[in-house]
């Protein structure tokens, strides 16, 4: 009985995560596709939705909670954040450098 309850709880968690992911993705796509708002508003909405999307994925798909987690989970989150910042920052730096050289 406990195993069946755990499976239901996990399936419910995935379905909630899927619903949140769709709710955070589809409106942003609509804003961009149909140009429904000014450019800066779209950028801010996209950035906020992206941060919320990350939190939803960590909570509902990876089952990582900040309360009561082990040190290894914290290291995993911090290392992943570092790698993403290095990749994103490096890409932006590289493209900006190419832009200044071409102009």
Image (cartoon, grey):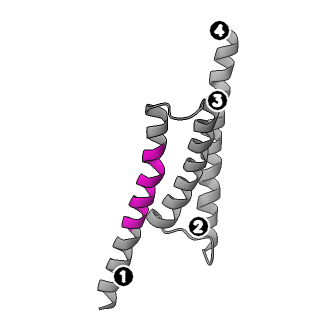
- Of the two numbered discs 3 and 4 on the same chain, state the one appearing first in sequence: 3
Q: Secondary structure at mark 4?
A: helix
Q: Can you identify the residue that label 3 sits on?
A: 92
**63, above or below 56, in the image:** below
Q: Are marks 3 and 4 in contact (CB under 8 Å)?
A: no
Q: CA distance from mark 2 to mark 1?
A: 21 Å
Residue under the point 64% across and 24% down: 94
Characterize the magenta stretch by its predominant secondary structure.
helix
Q: Nearer the viewer, residue 87 or 15?
A: 15
How would you rate the neighbour count of disc 1 (Cα within 10 Å): few for under 14, some for 14-19, many for 20 or more? few
**44, above or below 39, in the image:** below
> Could you say which disc has been placed on residue 73 in the image?
2
Q: CA distance from mark 3 to mark 4?
A: 15 Å
Q: Can you identify the residue that label 1 sits on?
A: 6
- Of the two numbered discs 3 and 1 on the same chain, state the one appearing first in sequence: 1
Does the segment drawn in magenta span residue 16?
Answer: yes
Q: Position of residue 53 (x, y in %)?
A: 52, 53
How would you rate the neighbour count of disc 4 (Cα within 10 Å): few for under 14, some for 14-19, many for 20 or more? few
Q: Are marks 2 and 1 in contact (CB under 8 Å)?
A: no
Does the segment drawn in magenta span residue 15?
Answer: yes
Q: Can you identify the residue that label 4 sits on?
A: 102
> Magenta segment range?
14-27
Residue under the point 65% across and 43% down: 85
- Of the two numbered discs 2 and 1 on the same chain, state the one appearing first in sequence: 1
- Of the two numbered discs 2 and 4 on the same chain, state the one appearing first in sequence: 2
- Of the two numbered discs 4 and 1 on the same chain, state the one appearing first in sequence: 1
Residue under the point 41% across and 66% down: 16
């Amino acid at each position: 009985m406990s195993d069946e309850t755990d499976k239901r709880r996990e399936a419910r968690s995935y379905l909630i995560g899927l619903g949140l992911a769709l709710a955070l993705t589809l409106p942003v796509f609509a804003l961009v596709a149909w140009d429904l708002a000014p450019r800066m508003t779209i950028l801010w909405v996209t950035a906020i939705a992206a941060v919320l999307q990350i939190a939803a994925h960590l909570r509902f798909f990876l089952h990582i909670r900040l309360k009561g987690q082990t040190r290894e989970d914290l290291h995993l989150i911090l290392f992943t954040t570092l790698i993403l910042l290095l990749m994103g920052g490096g890409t932006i730096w590289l493209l900006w450098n190419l832009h200044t050289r071409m102009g």
